[in-house]
Every structure is written in structure tokens, then in C-alpha cells.
Amino acid sequence: MIARLVYNVPVFGWMLKEAAQGSQTAKVLFVINCALIWLLAIIAFGYPAIIIPALVLVPVVFVLLILITMG
């Protein structure tokens, strides 16, 4: 149900659906597209486009470090 909702997002949805269900080439192209979208955001918005994803990933990395050290 959530996947269907995400797949219905106009541009990002069909790329994500193709990456999830498509060939290896589709997966690589999806990663390249995400990197290019991030680069475009950096060009358009500057420094905040670099910092905000890093700040969002801090809790994720923190939890991963805790899981690694637990064994």
C-alpha cells in the first residue's frame, strides 16, 4: 500500500518503481539521477543543500554505530 502511494508521485515514483522492479541498468541510472538532483540542489540553493542531508543522516549513522558495537 505504501509502495503504491510512493509510486504514484509524479516524477520520482516511476523512477523508484523502475529501480525496484527493473534491471541492473535501471538501478544504476536511478542512483545517477539522485546524485544529479542533489548536485542541482547544491547549485540552486548552495550550502544548505549540502548540510541538510548530512544533518539528517547523523541519527542514522549514530544508530548504526550503536548496532555495530552491540555485536
Image (cartoon, rainbow, N blue to C red):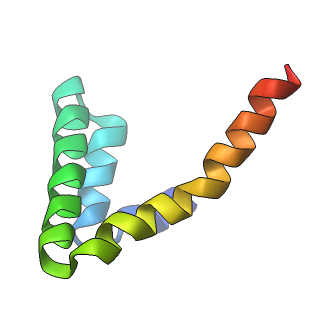
Residue 7's quadrant in the figure? bottom left
Q: Residue furthest front?
A: 47
Q: Which residue lies furthest to the bottom in this view?
A: 45
Left or right, 6 with respect to 43, comes to: right
Left or right, 67 with respect to 14, comes to: right
Please state the horizontal and vertical placement of residue 39, each as a whole percent of the image. Answer: 16, 60
Q: Which residue is drawn at 20% across and 71% down?
A: 41
In the depicted view, which residue is nearer to us: 2 or 56? Answer: 56
Q: Which residue is drawn at 79% across and 37% down?
A: 66
Residue 57's quadrant in the figure? bottom right
As displayed, is residue 20 above or below residue 51? above
In the depicted view, which residue is nearer to us: 38 or 43? Answer: 43
Left or right, 41 with respect to 17, comes to: left
Please state the horizontal and vertical placement of residue 33, each as a whole percent of the image. Answer: 17, 51
Please state the horizontal and vertical placement of residue 25, each as a whole percent of the image. Answer: 16, 29
Q: How many marks?
A: 0
Q: In which quarter of the image is the N terminus?
A: bottom right
Q: Residue at x 79, y 32 (%)?
A: 67
Q: Residue at x 21, y 75 (%)?
A: 46
Q: Quadrant of the C terminus?
A: top right
Q: Residue furthest right?
A: 70
As displayed, is residue 17 above or below residue 20? below
